[in-house]
Image (cartoon, helix red, strand yellow):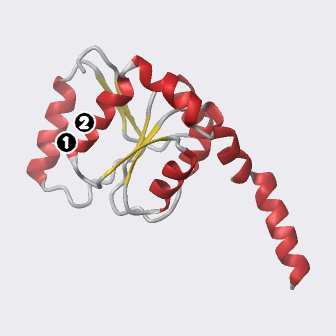
Amino acid sequence: MKNKLFVLAGPLSWYGFTNGQREKLTRGIERAPNIMTHFMELSESSMNEAVMVSDILFAAYRDFPNSSNLLTKAAFYQKPILVSDGHLMAERVRKYKMGEVVDEGNIVQICNALCRMLDPKYFDKLKEQARWDEYYNNHSVVKLREAMSKLLKTL
C-alpha cells in the first residue's frame, strides 16, 4: 500500500496507549512518506472536504456504541466506509451495504478489508449494492424533524 495516501485526521485519543506505544506510532508515522496527520479538531467544512476527496473512510473506532455523522457523510458523498463490529455503526453499514465491517482492533482484518476496498473493482460492485440514498434520507435532519413532530403530537 505504499502507493496509496493515508490521512489520519481529527483528535487522536491517546488513552490506553503506553508511552512506548505512543513513541513507536509517532516514529512510524514520521517515517512513512504516504501518511499525513492532523490530530486536531476539524471544522465541519474541513471534515466535509476531507471526506469529499477521500476514496475510503475509516471509522473502525474502539468501543464506540453510538453512530457517527461520518456514516451520513459517507452516504451523502457515496464513499465506502470501514467500521468495527459490535455496535450501531456496524449494524447500519451492513443494513445499507455501505462498506466493510471488521472485528474491533483486529489489525489483520483491517488490513485485508482495506486491501479489498482499494481494489478498483470494489467501488463498482459497491455502487450496485449500496443504499446510500436510502441511508441519507432515513438519517437526515428532515427525517429527524418529522419524527420529533410526530412524537410531540402524541404527547
Q: Mark 1 is on which residue type?
A: Val
Q: Is residue 2 above or below residue 38?
A: above
Image position, residue 141 (x, y; %)? 76, 53
Using residue 26 as the reference point, say whether residue 72 is left or right of it: right
**Residue farthest right in this picture:** 153
Image position, residue 34 (x, y; %)? 28, 20
Residue at 65% x, 47% y: name it. Answer: 135
Which image quarter is the C terminus in?
Answer: bottom right
Image position, residue 73 (x, y; %)? 60, 40
The answer to whether residue 61 of the structure is visible from this angle is yes
From the image, tell me which residue sits under label 2: 111
Image position, residue 129 (x, y; %)? 56, 35
Q: Secondary structure at mark 2?
A: helix
Q: Secondary structure at mark 1?
A: helix
Dot 1, how many residues are within 10 Å of its Cα: few (below 14), some (14-19), or many (20+)? few
Using residue 89 as the reference point, say whether residue 26 is left or right of it: left
